[in-house]
Amino acid sequence: MTFRQKIGYFLRLAISVVSPKQRYLFLRHYSILALPSDLIPTAENCWYRVLKKGIVRKEASINLEEESEKLLKQSEDALPLVSCLLVTKNRFQLAKKSVECFMRQSYPNRELIVIDDGEDRQLKDWVEGLKNSKIRFFHLPDKSKKLGVLRNLSREKARGEFVAQWDDDDLSHYNRLLFQMTLIQKMNLDGCTLQREELWFPTKQRFGYSARRLWEGSMICNNKKLPLYHETRRGEESDAVNQLSLNGKIALLDFPQLYTYCFHGKNTFDEPHFEQIWEVASVKFSEKEYEERKNNIFK
């Protein structure tokens, strides 16, 4: 056992007896835990951790291509309905890309709930023109409601047993729902989040993979198990998702290509926040690799 693995072993023991408040801090920054010595991720197999009440219970790899094929042998109605929750306001071009990501998803039993409280009707008119029965659009009067309030409203409108956060300025791989739901179904979980995400900063031509932690925006979970979002303007999802992690059973999947966090200058959080995330990124691709990585997002 290496020194790093010994540290991880003793950390696991310590985490199992500390208070939930202390576990909360661990969940956000737990990357010090070493990869198990007998686990070697490959191009086919992805690494994941199962947390039960904030404690690591299982570490393993899974071939999601293979496992998802088994899931898709079921009829659409036999699969749990996943409601993707999109809250937006006056950001037509960004939200349009997010809706297009939803339409490309390979997981069949899904719906998109769009909550739009902006005065711009472009998105409403465009969505109505799609005539897609899987998209339900709600255009609200602009009353400057906080993001947490609107996210809770989208959950009230959701018909699915599971919900997926679907931010209007980030991008999801076409297999995001399928692969995360495959792991949820196979392991009988309350939810699944990514432990790394792609980072894309177009104006500075940066592309990389984030550090490992619990990334709230990529969560797919049982709607009944997720606490209400705080009624705040930003960071509203963090506490709800972490509370689920401390009280339920979730997986942290290491498959960063499933979700791309984009910094475009009008994000909820400002550029210094993104710079902090970039500073500790686990992978930073070169300028030569930038174009290839960027183009892969839209395949």
Image (cartoon, grey):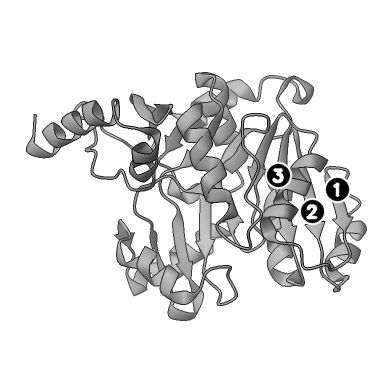
* Quadrant of residue 276 within the rendered picture: bottom left
Q: Which residue is mark 3?
A: 84
Is 76 displayed left or right of 36 in the figure? right
Q: Position of residue 183 (x, y in %)?
A: 51, 28
| Figure quadrant of the C terminus | bottom right
Position above or below: 192 against 171: above
Visible in this render: residue 249?
A: no
Q: What type is the residue that disc 1 sits on?
A: Arg
- Judging depth in this view, the residue of 118 and 246 nearest the camera is 246
Q: Position of residue 109 (x, y in %)?
A: 75, 32
Q: Do callouts 3 and 1 mark residues in contact (Cβ within 8 Å)? A: no
The single residue placed furthest to the bottom in the displayed view is: 203
Residue displayed at 52% across by 24% down? 67
Q: Do callouts 3 and 2 mark residues in contact (Cβ within 8 Å)? A: no
Q: Position of residue 221 (x, y in %)?
A: 60, 34
Q: Earlier in the sequence, mark 3 or mark 2?
A: 3
Q: What type is the residue that disc 3 sits on?
A: Cys
Is 116 displayed left or right of 206 in the figure? right
What is the secondary structure assignment of the residue under circle 2? strand
* Quadrant of residue 278 within the rendered picture: bottom left
Q: Earlier in the sequence, mark 2 or mark 1?
A: 2
What is the secondary structure assignment of the residue under circle 3? strand
Is 196 displayed left or right of 269 in the figure? left
Residue displayed at 77% across by 72% down? 90
Quote the CA–CA distance across marks 2 and 1: 6 Å
- Judging depth in this view, the residue of 77 and 220 nearest the camera is 220
Mark seen at residue 114: 2
Q: Earlier in the sequence, mark 3 or mark 1?
A: 3
- Judging depth in this view, the residue of 34 and 70 nearest the camera is 34
Q: Do callouts 2 and 1 mark residues in contact (Cβ within 8 Å)? A: yes
Q: Which residue is mark 1?
A: 136
